[in-house]
Image (tube, grey):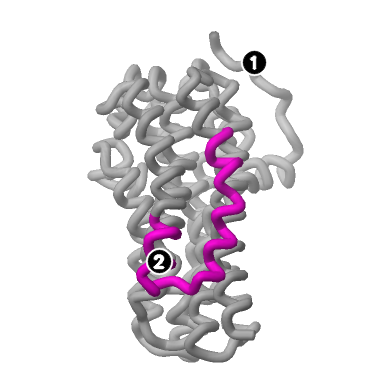
């Protein structure tokens, strides 16, 4: 059944909805984790942290804006879509306005990246440029990887591994195995957010020839993938803490395991359609909680 069309919001409200605030924990969590783990090897610099956080959020906004515009142009945002309404598809923002929004958000992210490059060196410019490229080409460009079943892998790579490593590099100006270890659970939980989104849209994506991994795997296997990612995050934390790659204080993150169990039971139990929208928000909250607790563990270990 098609989702009822909500009344058109005011322009400012339309832009806020296009930003998709519930998705922003995907950007915040790896910065918290990477910064906290980096504290084990150096001093915490609040200015660098703030810049990294702002840059990460801006990149997430670029992802959201580009996805909004590209899915509309490719016909993926049909009236049957069960997710929250998209600004361009609803006519709240024109294609031209969204294109300008993408340009402004990208420019702001690049400005933050340039400032960080001046402070910590050229590697952060490479990291930021790669993340922006991944953001724009998720559903945009001639070969959108989100339409070719590669979204989950790229999400894990850039919003898990690259994001945590980048946040840590901003603080200590080097990469470490500890940062790499911290990126694994965050890669799992951020990918789980995407899995819920794609599970909800599996039927409309299939109809519009958007070949997400969920479409390739099918509904049952996608539900298993979600649970595997959630539990995989906590297994990774326990293993890396046991072998010394993460401080034992990061085991604080295991306190989020009951939430992961609850969410996995809901997904494996058949939660579907529009009922997955709250699950999307709760998975984002799980991701934020895990990142914050890993970061807190790193900070406590320095005390």
- Does residue 174 sit above or below 212 in this rendering? below
Q: Residue 170 location, x and y as percent?
A: 48, 81
Task: Write down the residue under mark 1.
Answer: 4
Q: Residue 197 location, x and y as percent?
A: 47, 33
- Does residue 140 sit above or below 278 in this rendering? below
Task: Write down the residue under mark 2.
Answer: 242
Which residue is painted at 45% across and 43% down in the image?
230
- Does residue 23 sit above or below 293 in this rendering? above
Corner quadrant of residue 284: top right
Q: Quadrant of the C terminus?
A: bottom right
Give 202 or 19, whichever is nearer the viewer.
202
Which residue is painted at 55% across and 75% down in the image?
298
Q: Which residues are magenta?
A: 236-262
Is residue 249 found inside the magenta-colored segment of the image? Answer: yes
Q: Is residue 245 left or right of residue 265?
A: left
**Which residue occupies the extreme top position in the image?**
1
Q: Is residue 303 left or right of residue 109?
A: right
- First in sequence: mark 1 or mark 2? 1
């Amino acid at each position: 059944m098609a989702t009822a069309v909500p009344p058109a919001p005011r322009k400012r409200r339309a832009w806020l909805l296009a930003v998709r605030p519930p998705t922003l924990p995907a950007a915040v969590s790896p910065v918290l984790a990477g910064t906290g783990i980096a504290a084990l090897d150096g001093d915490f610099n609040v200015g660098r942290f703030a810049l990294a956080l702002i840059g990460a959020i801006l990149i997430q906004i670029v992802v959201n804006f580009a996805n909004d515009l590209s899915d509309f142009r490719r016909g993926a945002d049909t009236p049957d879509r069960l997710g929250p309404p998209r600004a361009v598809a609803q006519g709240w923002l024109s294609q031209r306005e969204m294109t300008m929004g993408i340009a402004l958000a990208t420019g702001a992210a690049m400005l933050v990246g340039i400032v960080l490059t001046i402070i910590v060196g050229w590697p952060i410019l490479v990291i930021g440029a790669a993340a922006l490229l991944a953001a724009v080409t998720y559903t945009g460009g001639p070969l959108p990887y989100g339409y070719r079943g590669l979204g989950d892998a790229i999400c894990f790579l850039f919003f898990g591994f690259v994001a945590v490593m980048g946040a840590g590099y901003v603080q200590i100006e080097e990469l470490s195995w500890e940062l790499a270890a911290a990126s694994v659970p965050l890669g799992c939980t951020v990918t789980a957010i995407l899995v819920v989104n794609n599970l909800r849209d599996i039927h409309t994506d299939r109809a519009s020839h958007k070949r997400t991994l969920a479409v390739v795997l099918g509904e049952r296997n996608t539900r298993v993938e979600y649970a595997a990612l959630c539990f995989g995050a906590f297994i990774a934390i326990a293993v890396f803490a046991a072998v010394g790659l993460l401080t034992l204080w990061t085991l604080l993150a295991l306190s989020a395991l009951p939430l992961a169990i609850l969410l996995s039971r809901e997904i494996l139990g058949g939660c579907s359609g529009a009922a997955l929208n709250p699950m999307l928000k709760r998975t984002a909250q799980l991701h934020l909680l895990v990142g914050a607790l890993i970061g807190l563990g790193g900070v406590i270990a320095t005390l």
